[in-house]
Image (cartoon, grey):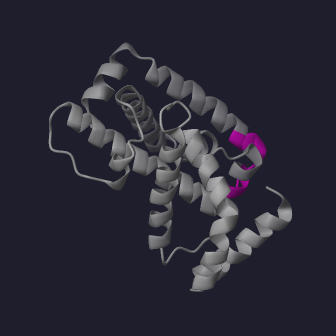
Amino acid sequence: MDAPRGQEITQLLAAWSEGDEGAFERLVPLVYAELKRLARRYMYREAEGHILQTTALVHEAYLKLVAQKDAKWQNRVHFFAVSSQQMRRILVDTARSRMRQKRGAEAPVISLDDAPALSEPRAAEFLALDDALNDLAKLDPRRGRVVEMRYFGGMSVEETAAALNVSVDTVMRDWKGAKAWLHAQLNRPEAGRHRTQSG
């Protein structure tokens, strides 16, 4: 994203944080394409109905962002980091619902069920990754945020460093270490069985 547009987004976010509803209306067209890009990163392995599903995820995240009336947005990087977090939570809820339905349990209805976001194998895979990422965040919160921003949010090393207020070298070290840790966790023989049955 070019610098002038990034600055405009930051200014509109600040105005929205101060209660300017008109700022939010002007903000939406500027951030929509980026929100779609974030959603596509989450949905990258899904095939059928991909565009509809991506749009449903963006709209669900949009509703959650609108509900954050008291949010104090620092800048566009902060906004997209929170957006990415919201999308992850939505898909985790959807995946858990799908896995409960598969086991025959009563599942809460959420709006994304009208446009299913995750196939059953993808749901199990996504929950395993989410569980491993939660474990990582408990051990090393910053590394957990680096993965969330880089992998899920598609943020650059520089954007991640700015959002976390650390150096680019620190982000690179955290990213490398986190990937190795997650790979080891997700490839343990018992991990797949445990992750799929839990939640």
Q: Where is residue 108 in the image (x, y as percent from the top left)?
A: 22, 51
Q: In this view, does 78 lie to the left or right of 97?
A: right
Residue 168 in the magenta stretch? The answer is yes
Name which quarter of the figure residue 122 lies in: top left
Q: How many marks?
A: 0
| Residue 143 appearing in the image | no
Q: In this view, does 140 lie to the left or right of 3?
A: left
- Residue at image point 64% right, 80% down: 23
- Residue at image point 52% right, 51% down: 55
Give the answer, above or below, for where 189 lies relative to 94: above
Find the magenta span and give its range.
161-171
Viewer-proximal residue among 22 and 145: 22
Q: Residue furthest left?
A: 105
Q: Position of residue 141 (x, y in %)?
A: 52, 47
Viewer-proximal residue among 199 and 190: 199
Q: Where is residue 8 in the image (x, y as percent from the top left)?
A: 77, 72
Q: Main secondary structure of the magenta part?
A: helix
Residue 134 in the magenta stretch? The answer is no
**Looking at the rendering, in which quadrant would you find the N terminus?**
bottom right
Q: Is residue 45 left or right of residue 131?
A: right
Q: Position of residue 182 (x, y in %)?
A: 51, 28
- Residue at image point 63% right, 62% down: 78
Viewer-proximal residue among 131 and 17: 17
- Residue at image point 29% right, 24% down: 194
